[in-house]
Image (spheres, grey):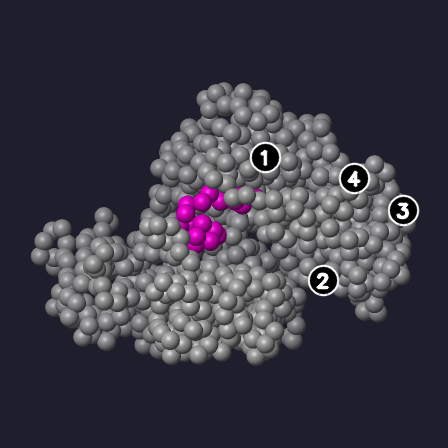
Amino acid sequence: MATISPNNNLEGMALNRARGRGIRAASKANDATIGNELPRPGTGDSMESLSKSFGGNCSLGGEQALTHKRDSGVASATPASSVSSASGDGSEPAILPGKLPPTRAKPARTIDIVSNMNELVLPTEAYVYRYDVEIQVVHLNGVKDLSKGPPNDYLREERRKNCYKVWQYIVQRESAFFGDPYTLYYDRAATLYSLTKLAFKESSGQQFTVPKQQISESPLIKDVLPKDKGECILIGIKCAEQCNLLLSDFAGCIDPDVNSRDRTLQQFLELATSQKIFETDAYFNFGNKAFLKNEGRLDLGGGKWLCTGFEKNVRFVGDDERSVAAVLQIDSKKTAFFKEILVSDFVSEHLRVRLGELQQRGMRPDEIKSVSHQLRDLVVYTHNGAQFEADALSRERAQDIMLDIEDKQVSLPTYFKEKYGIQLTCPNLPCVVQRQQTRAGWRTKHHPMELVKIRPGQRVDLKKQTPEQVEKMIKDCAVLPKKRMEETEQHRQHAGLGASRPNEFLANLQLQIVEKHKTAKAAVLHAPTVVYKTDKQPVDSSRGDWKMHANRKFFRPARVGIWVAMLFDERLDGPSAENFVNQLVNKCRQRGMDINLPSHYEKAKLNTDYIKQLMQTYVAHGVKYILFISPDNKDTAHDLMKLMEQQTQITTQDVRTKTVRKATGDRGADMVLENLAMKANMKLGGLCHALEASTDFLRLNGLQSNVMTQRWLRPSRLFVGLDVCHPPPQSREERCLKIPPKEPSVVGMCVSAGETALDLTGCFWYTMPKQEAIISDLEVYFGDALKQVKEKRGSLPQEIVVYRDGVSEGQYGMVITQEQLKFRKAFRLAGGPDYKPHLTIVVVQKRGSYRIMPPAPTGAKAFDQNVPPGTTVDHTIVHPSHTEWIMVPHRTIQGTAKPIRCTVVVDDEPRLSMEDLEGTMYALCYAHEIVNSPTSLPAPLYGAHELAKRGRNNFRVYKNVDGSTTSGNFSLSAPTSISQALDDFDEASEALDVRKGELKGTKFWA
């Protein structure tokens, strides 16, 4: 299967522009040399390594021997993954490192877990046959593929439903050709699988025609043709390139070369287990997710529902290639949908104002803007059935809109009264605007909102969810494991994937779904010992948290120079704000920080020009730190101050008003102050704690040396986190006009470039949007980070461990064939041709559908029902041919634990052991330094995620993408070409570069 790769032309343009800038001069100068030194694609050696790993044995002693070899002072490694200098289009080999045996170190304890997987028992000698299907509608204006069209939720689902209706009709009409309909597995678009070979009359395939009369007489398909324009429907079927599929052949599914993996069997099984869902039509379907249309809905307010459903996947798991099993993985899901209601009712619900009151007083400009944001690109339909994608609400009232009718001007209410006999009840309200593309250009139509209705099945984008709705969703989705297991099982049975409902599709296939969920033994890893300046604190491995004693000092307390406090929230009085500041200063001093009271208090106005002038004044007076208090649920002050932080190099810390009230209240105040003090210490160059291996771990495994500092987090090892933050999709009009994107994707990179592995620094940069490959400029930014490490530590690292987020399984090849090469290029940029450190890249996925939990959850709280922090599974329920593990590193205090799935995609020889990989990652989950418990991601990756978000924030304020700044100093003009878009993103990368000045080397984003 080909990997998803960036547009080569765009990427080439981006690189050429990058190389023209000063900071990329070194990159350009070394291009030719580096190209000649790339490792060649592997052949038999890689496969031999894979077969050895299946039968190998990795013990603690063996790992110590490898450690001794790596510590010999030679920074050289042999790439274990096959790579080449080809274009990265998926044609070259991309071989994953072989599967390592499970860890052999003794854990804190071993527990039983149950997964959300049910094994699929497949027939041993059964074949299915694959065909390509094309359904076309012939009408007066030409021929249209029924399966293709705009990506809107409703329109896409309607196309698929129409394809399925046509399919059901033709299968029934041509029953002699197709046979039993329950032996046919159709994806509602272009792919068909059949249990029997279809007998084509011609070798090229078969075509069926459904004439207009038959269509009009069939209740099933009479609405498929365009009104008064349709002539007939054509259904074409032909053999696919890979026609025959043996259901028991797993070899191609687990090929170590991910660019050669055959996903056909996986796709077929996912399709076969979806047939009953399609047939019942009780769900809104989106890829591998399905949501019930009318059952179990929660009213979120604001014209939106929270609908319940599930995500379904088929995976291949096992301990090796001989024990492969196909499993069905189902996880309960919930998401928000727009209600199918009149736009006028939606406006009333969204604004929380009765419709009669709105009609009486009219709508304010800010209300029109808010509703327009909600309606944009929603599919709606009018009283007479006309359907379109809404653009906005009009600025004018319906009664003020005039139409040219037969050479005279008629008001909109008068037109509807005379044309349709409809008396508008809301003439004082705006209309729904439709923008229609014609040959002459764009045409605007206005529709009274009381006559326009929202189509069902349209999900609510995150940017259209209000804080109150998000809070309701979080509360309803935070389901404890016991209830989640019950909900997941109910969904499985309801979808015809359990014993309670017959499923003729699976019965004919002789496919059985094991009712019992797949179980495994899990290791609970040892929590580390937390080291402070004054003492050490062992962490209870069963709980994963610890408390701060009164006299405990930060490991490296920060010194705070001149600083000021700013208040943006007018609802908080000055004395209350000053009281909070005093308490925070006392807490910082208690933890050893050198900090005085602020030199100045400022009651600030939220005005761009004023803030810019004020910040320049602070720069002139040597201010190093600003603590500002901003209103709840409003990001304007935060967003503006974070841009000013980058431009003035003054460290800033935002505290919301509700946090101030908690910090000065009666319950939990001390914990809030502790967290704020830790955050301030990290921002200002301090380090709250260090880490050591626990005495229990050392004792149980017979070790004398500190495995944490001498092996896992040793100074010669560098940790890197990489993540990408993508912009929202373009509007329908922008897509139609092919307007280049005005917002980039943002790459966040966090590196342990300080004195220790816990001293994190980072940066971000901008690239063309929607490209998961972050190869653009990676070698430049990472090469700069390596030089920073050398300045701090006196030498370049011998080992590089990269944690990469935002990559799906289908994109592993992209990391191997593209991003890996950029890292090796950075090695040469920083250390010359002889610098070849050991490289390991681990893809970390948090957004998957994996769940692990105790077999019989008990207790009333989330922490009691969930698995403990450090729970790790590296066998039975993970991939059979490459190195993978499932981990719950964090304390689960709400709902059901969401594990991370970790996959090694690059690992040079000599290989790291599972103990090293898992132990290092779990230790780094204790390195966030802002809370006294582990996080759900290792600290470098957590930092990369935050840096990508910060980069997006700074770009949006810098360019005033959403018009939210209060001054016209920042302006955005949409680029007119791809070239200009690249120039804009390059210019922003330069202007917003955080690698300059005093912020460099600090955890300013904490």
| Amino acid type of the residue tagged 2 in the rendering | Asp
Left or right: where 252 falls relative to 569: left
Secondary structure beneath label 1: helix
Q: Earlier in the sequence, mark 4 or mark 1?
A: 4
Judge whether residue 737 is colored magenta. yes
Q: CA distance from mark 1 to mark 3?
A: 36 Å
Q: Which residue is mark 3?
A: 599
Q: Tell me the distance, in whole angstroms, between the alpha carbons under discs 2 and 1.
A: 33 Å
Left or right: residue 511 compared with residue 66 = left
* Residue 709 percent across, percent down from the top left: 71, 41
Q: Is residue 105 left or right of residue 670?
A: left
* Mark toward the start of the polypeptide (4 vs 3): 3
Callout 2: SS: loop
- Left or right relative to 813: residue 910: right
Residue 703 position in % (x across, y down): 69, 45
* Residue shown at the point (45%, 45%) measured from the top left: 739
Residue hosting label 4 = 616
User: What amino acid type is highlighted by mark number 1?
Assistant: Glu
Mark 4 element type:
helix
Looking at the image, is mark 2 or mark 4 earlier in the sequence?
4
